[in-house]
Every structure is written in structure tokens, then in C-alpha cells.
Amino acid sequence: MSRETWAAVDAHLVELFVHHDAALEQALARSADAGLPPIQVSPTQGKLLWLLARAAGARRILEIGTLGGYSTIWLARALPADGRLITLEIEPDRAEVARRNLASTGLDHLVEVRVGAALSTMARLVAEEVGSFDMVFVDADKRRLPDYVAASLELSRPGTMIVVDNVVREGQVLDAASADADVVGVRRCLEVLAADPRLDATALQTVGAKGYDGFAVALVAAS
């Protein structure tokens, strides 16, 4: 199978399950116009995040890695009227694009975009005693994935769902000898998810318009 086939299947699935969505398409266009890299989740992956958040009954969501807010919109749409989503972005310009995208969808009242290094911001959230989140979506720099998972556990409760994107990276995850910090980070992240007794986890390979990759899903177990 080729990337062209994967992309064609993705287009078919988007037509079936996502349909035309002017707000999401405008968010992508605004992000492209701002020069943001096209590394956001695909439409079908966004729909999956929405379904996972709905299935988890999430009222409070933490997102690590905002970019232009595309996945943020999907997650915020899954929240109840009194829900809350905090999304973390290190780049101020990207955060501003995300804020504009969220405002255009009418979801900005549910979402707080915090700018700064994610680990520092997560430590502040713990210090602020904001409480636990029902779902955490991690889509940020791969070399720090193990640290993001560890920090997420500090903001979780039994039953919290943690979703980590880009954990296969075109099969690079198999390269145990790699000196690439991103590959090392992904491998270590999967090892942590598999070994931590507080987590029940799995990981899946994916193909599609975004190429060959994968994601991991974990539930924080009851203590």
C-alpha cells in the first residue's frame, strides 16, 4: 500500500464521518496562512479524540501542544457547557492563532491557552491546585514525552485517560540504537507507559493522510 492509497482512504472516511466543517477548515486555513507547520492531527484523528473524550465523559481536559488549535477545537466540542480545557503552547505566535481559531468557533469561553514551556506550566498547575483532569492529550516535542507523561500523572485521577500522539514515527521506534533525541523520547515514553503500575495502556499503529505513525492510550488505574 502507498501513501496515495492511505490518503485516498482517509479522504473517503472524512467524507463519511466528518463531512464539511467550515469552522475546522477555516482553522486549518488560518494556521496555514500564519505559516504554522501542517502537523496537526488529521480530521479522522480529530473525530477520534472527540469520541474518546465523549466516551470518557470528560469535563476537564488538558492538552499539551496547541499549535493552531485544531485538535483543541475537537476536544472542546466534546465538553459539556460547564467544561474546561487548558491547552499549553510554548510559542506565543502559535497560541495567538489558536485563540483566534477558538474565538471563531465560539469555544473560547471553554478554553484557556497558556503560553510557556509545558513542564513548567504543568508544575504551576499542580501548585495552583487546579485539580485533576479527566483526559490528557499529549502532542508536543517527542524528546520530552516521558516527562510529559510523568507530569500528567500528577494532574490525573483513577480513570483519567492519557492519549499520546506520534509514538511510531515511520517505524523509527524500532531503532534501539538511534541517537535521535525524538526517537529516544518516544521509545522511553512507550516503556514508561508499559511499565508504570499506575497505568493500563496500549499503542496502535496508524496510516493515513499523515503517513505512518501511531498513538498510545492509557488509563490511570485505581490505586
Image: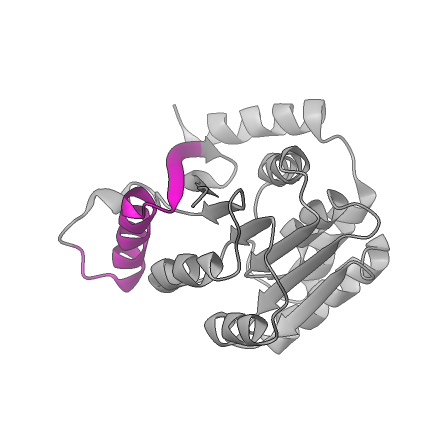
How many numbered marks does the figure carry?
Answer: 0
Residue 42 in which image quadrant: top right
Q: Quadrant of the N terminus?
A: top left
Q: Image point 39% across, 44% down: which residue? A: 199
Residue 211, horizontal then vertical, whole percent? 44, 39
Q: Say if the magenta span includes residue 202.
A: yes
**Colour scheme used in the picture?**
one colour
Q: Is residue 116 above or below residue 4?
A: below
State the residue in front, 110 or 220. Answer: 220
- Residue projecting furthest to the front: 223
State the residue in front, 115 or 95. Answer: 115
Q: Which residues are magenta?
A: 178-206
Residue 85, horizontal then vertical, whole percent? 69, 57
Q: Is residue 114 left or right of residue 204?
A: right
Q: Image point 60% across, 70% down: which residue? A: 129
Q: Image point 64% across, 72% down: which residue? A: 114
Q: Is residue 74 left or right of residue 222?
A: right
State the residue in front, 65 or 104. Answer: 65
Residue 134, horizontal then vertical, whole percent? 60, 48
Residue 164 shows in this picture: yes
Q: Image point 67% across, 67% down: which residue? A: 34
Q: Is residue 105 left or right of residue 47?
A: right
Q: Say if the magenta span includes residue 196.
A: yes
Residue 213, horizontal then vertical, whole percent? 40, 40
Q: Is residue 196 left or right of residue 89?
A: left
Residue 39 shows in this picture: no
